[in-house]
Amino acid sequence: MPRALTISNEPLLAPKTNIAEVIATYSKRLFGFIRQRVESEEDAEDILQDVFYQFIGSAQPIGQVSGWLFRVARNKITDEYRRKHPELLEDLYPERGDEDQLNWTELFFDAENPETEYLRSMFWDVLDQALQELPAEQRDVFILNELDGVPFKVLAAQCGETVNTLISRKRYAVLHLRERLRVLKDELLNY
C-alpha cells in the first residue's frame, strides 16, 4: 500500500523567518545608504520599501543577499533620479540593457574601493577635457545647468538668451560629451 505524503508546516515558515531576518538585519544600513543619495526621507522610505518588495517577490535564489540588496537599491535610486530629473547627467549614460555595458552611475553610487576611485578619477578627467573642447557658450550652459543645477529660466534671465537657445546649446554639449565618454567606455571594455 502506498504511503501518504505529508507536508510539514516547518519548511513553509522558514522562508518567512529568513525574510524577516534579512529585513531586520539590513533595513537600517540600507536606509542610511539610500537616504544619503536621495532628496528626502520619504523618497528613501519608498525606495527601501521597493527594494524589500522586490526581494520578497524574487523567484530566483539570491546567493549574496547584501550585495543584491545594495545593487537593487542603487538601481532604484537611479530610477528615482531619472524620473525626477529627466534632462540631467543621465543623458550621458547608456540606456539600461546588456549587463556587459559599462554603467557610469556605478562610478557615483558604488562602494569606495581603489578600482572605483580610479575609474571615477578617469571619468572626471575625460569629462573635464571634453568640456574644454566645447565652445564657451555650450560649456557654460552645460556646467551651470547640469553640474550647478541652475534652471534654464534663471540662466535665460541672466544672459539674455531664450530658453530654447540654451537648451539647444546644452544639447550640442551633451552630444559631444556622450561621444567622448563612449570612447572612454570602449577603451575600458576592450582593455
Image (spheres, grey):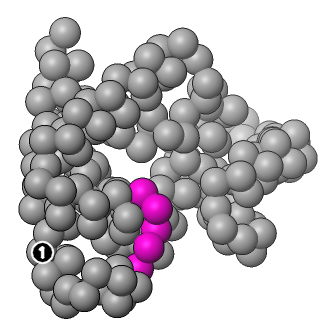
| Prevailing secondary structure class for the magenta stretch in the rendered image | loop
Instruction: Name the quadrant of the C terminus.
Output: top left
Residue 115: give x, y in percent of width and height.
Answer: 47, 14
45, 112: nearer the viewer = 112
Name which quarter of the figure residue 171 lies in: bottom left
SS for dot 1? helix
Q: Which amino acid does label 1 sit on?
A: Ser
Q: Answer whether residue 129 is visible to the viewer in this image.
A: yes
- Above or below residue 144? Residue 123 is above
Which residue: 42% across, 43% down? Answer: 105
Answer whether residue 148 is magenta in the image: yes
* Magenta-highlighted residues: 147-151
- Above or below residue 176? Residue 68 is above
Name which quarter of the figure residue 99 lies in: top left
68, 168: nearer the viewer = 168
Residue at which label 1 appears: 168
In the image, taking residue 89 as reference, residue 29 lies left or right, namely right
Instruction: Name the quadrant of the N terminus.
Output: top right
Residue 24: give x, y in percent of width and height.
Answer: 89, 47
Which residue: 72% across, 46% down? Answer: 33
In the image, taking residue 53 as reference, residue 18 lies left or right, namely right
